[in-house]
Image (cartoon, rainbow, N blue to C red):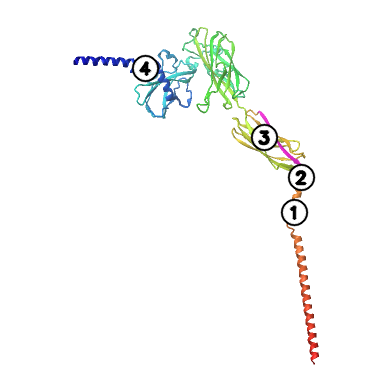
Amino acid sequence: MSRWKELMRGTAGVLAAVLIAGAGIGAPVKAEDKKEITEQSKENIEWKTVDNKVPSFEYQKSNVIRMYIKNNDKDKEIKSIVIEPYIDEENLDKWPFRKDNQDDKYEIDKIEAGKTNDKIAFEFTERDDIGSGNHKVYFRCTYKYEGDKENTVVDKGFWVKTTAKPEEAKKPLEVNITDKTPKDEGDKKGDDKKGEDEEPSDDDGGGFSNGDASYGGGGDGEGGEGSVQRVIVTGFDTSPKKVKAGSDFTLTVHLKNTSKKTKVKNMLFDLNAPEEGSDEQTTAPSFLPSSGSSTVYLDGMKANGTADISMKLNAKSDLLQKPYSVELSMKYEDSSGNAVEAASSLSIPVKQDARFEFSDFEINPESVAVGDEANVMCSLYNLGRVKLYNVRAIFEGDCIEKEEVFIGNVESGATASIDAMIKGAQMTEGPEPITMTMSYENEEGEATTEQKELMIDVTDMADGGMEEGLPMEEEQSKGFPVVPVVIVIGVIAMAAAAVIIIKRRKKKMQKSEEEDFLNELDGSAEDEQW
């Protein structure tokens, strides 16, 4: 009986295992599941280069790619972080750097929730046979979230810019001792690059320069002689001539095959513009295609031939007024099918339109007589990205004398005050318009004007004098008349004194007469008694 129970238990265990396997519990992660984890992890971490810059590498000069990783999770920390270059063995020729170390990787113990590690750095030196241009290099980051058993894997590509090995370093310059000139025009290098290879800057700051050409595979080229078929930029034009920020323009580049013997074919040109912007939201290439692409293909150019390529571009609206350097990379083949790489730089000046506003005018007094002056004031706000030079304002009109005021230079974002004294010249019938003309110059000294009207009332000189004199006379009449009052008071005082004196005299005379009358009465009485 016990054996039967053990057999039943074993059978039940096998059935349970089958059911669990059928339900997918403990099954290995599929490729699709791993992709979902990788995509989700991109949202959980932020992985970029420091300052979002593209590192530039020069021949035989090492440089550092600096990165940072931010843990965007607000609750969990990530740990066991390992960042390392991801080099596909099948495409080793696309990795632009030398392999100097057996183990290139950067390890971090942990990054707490919401924290950032910005100390990640990899030092590289470009390969001798790499050409000039932009390359995308990939790195792999593995990490675990707190509590996870499996690693999360994220692969990310970063752009780097490389500069080809100088031609003079690859082979000595072949010189004909007799005439001391290069063997072929295509071999001119270094300081000998004049005329076609380098154009001095014009008044607008535009220009171009040509880099060195090299074989993509590091070979010596046709016939093993090491002569590289060079295609150079001989100039460029823009339509319209002045490129303004925020506007579309057409860039036409003039090219020349410097070899007098062989043609080139399968030509591919790519325009790379620098990124501009103050933050991640506004950072973008300074020039972007307005239509079509920034890549142009040509079938070929004959020996000593010329050709033009054109691109329709848009200048970023917030670009400062200055020349911007863009790189034109070239890839083509010589007559034997050998790949050649080269690059040229173009300096495209960008202009910004001046933007400004005036405040309302303040006029004091609002009405002025002929020959008198009124104070006129307003503010000038420079709202653009360019400086205004030699700003001045001229006030003109039939009813005033011409007045000119010099303000000076006004920086971008600054405010200037326009303050003038306007003198009345001719009477008007009510307020009449006068014109303020403001002029300023740009960096090239080109003058521009802007006009604004204001109203002013000029009265007649005589009427104005009478009208202005009446209040003063009224004020004087309303004032206290000191002298007349003193005279009147004196006269009144004298009259009062005279009245008092007369009254006193009358009283004395009356009293004297009464005494005399009484005395007479007393005398007659005594006579009667006797």
Q: Which of 408/286 is in front?
A: 286
Which tag is nearer the camera, tag 4 or tag 3? 4
Percent x, y for residue 443? 62, 29
Q: Amino acid at mark 4?
A: Val
Q: Quick check: 117 left or right of 180? A: left
Mark with earlier residue (4, 2)? 4
Q: At which x and y percent is residue 81?
A: 38, 24
Start and end of the magenta stretch?
446-460
Residue to which mark 3 is pinned? 392
Q: Name the amino acid type tagged 3.
A: Arg
Where the N terminus falls, by quadrant?
top left
- Residue 500, visible in the rendered structure: yes
Q: Nearer the viewer, residue 426 or 72?
A: 72
Q: Earlier in the sequence, mark 4 or mark 3?
A: 4
Left or right: where 91 falls relative to 320: left
Question: Which residue carries the number 2 mark?
Answer: 464
Name the mark on residue 29. Answer: 4
Residue shown at 76% from the left, 68% from the top? 496
Crowd rating for badge 1 (residues with CA inside 10 Å; few <14, some 14–19, many 20+): few
Residue 427 sits in quarter: top right
Q: Please report contact status of discs 4 and 2: CB closer than 8 Å, yes or no.
A: no
Residue at the image position 42 percent from the left and 22 percent from the top: 40
Where disc 2 sits, the SS reads helix
Q: Give the spatial CA distance, label 2 vs label 1.
A: 19 Å
Q: Position of residue 277 (x, y in %)?
A: 53, 26
Q: Position of residue 337 (x, y in %)?
A: 50, 8
Q: Which residue is mark 1?
A: 476
**SS under mark 3:** strand
Give the residue type that dot 1 points to. Gln
Under circle 1, the secondary element is: helix
* Mark 2 vs mark 3, CA separation in Å: 32 Å
